[in-house]
Amino acid sequence: MFSRVESVLSAKGLGLDYLFFVKDCAIDLSLVGIVCTRDDGSVKIIAEGQEDNLVKFVERTKQRNATHPIENFYLKWGKYTGEFKEFTTDCGHH
């Protein structure tokens, strides 16, 4: 089943390398969506794809922060929308 997940997380030391790590994980799991840095420095992720791959994706993106513990984490599951055709990285602030 296709599904959608939206998450926002913050941790000290999350930089561009983390955004590209998230993108690589998404592509590896055949997911589409976007990862971006928000004005407050937190990272927002929207991903769509197979539900089992989304579960793996969430775990991978959380594990990457072993050296930079997550201070805040928000996760919301939703219905697949087909909004995205690929997974992109937006390095600007939103």
Image (cartoon, rainbow, N blue to C red):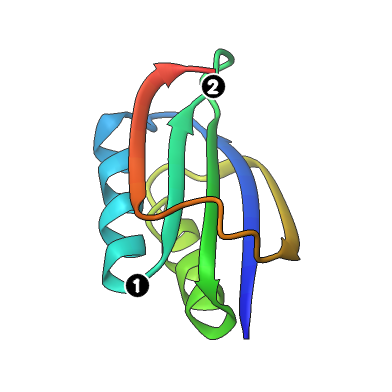
Residue 70 is drawn in which quadrant? top right
Q: Which residue is mark 1?
A: 30
Q: Amino acid at mark 1?
A: Ser
Drawn side of residue 70 relative to residue 89, left or right: right
* Residue nearest the observer in this picture, 73 or 88: 88
Q: Nearer the viewer, mark 1 or mark 2?
A: 1
| First of labels 1, 2 by sequence position | 1
Q: Which residue is mark 2?
A: 38
Q: How many marks?
A: 2
Does 67 appear above or below 76?
above
Residue drawn where x is 56% and y is 60% of the image: 82
* Label 1, label 2: how far apart the Cα atoms are: 24 Å
Horizontal and vertical percent position of residue 4 = 63, 63
Residue 30 is drawn in which quadrant? bottom left
Q: Are marks 1 and 2 in contact (CB under 8 Å)?
A: no
Horizontal and vertical percent position of residue 78 = 75, 62
Residue drawn where x is 55% and y is 28% of the image: 42
Q: Secondary structure at mark 2?
A: loop
Q: Secondary structure at mark 1?
A: loop
Does 67 appear above or below 51?
above
Residue drawn where x is 26% and y is 44% of the image: 20
Q: Counting other residues with Cα less than 10 Å from the Cα at mark 2, is it few (<14), some (14-19), or many (20 or more)? A: some
Drawn side of residue 82 relative to residue 6, left or right: left
Drawn side of residue 80 relative to residue 20, left or right: right
Horizontal and vertical percent position of residue 36 = 45, 32
Q: Which quarter of the figure is the N terminus placed in?
A: bottom right
Q: Amino acid at mark 2?
A: Arg
Does 60 appear above or below 6?
below
Q: Which quarter of the figure is the C terminus placed in?
A: top right
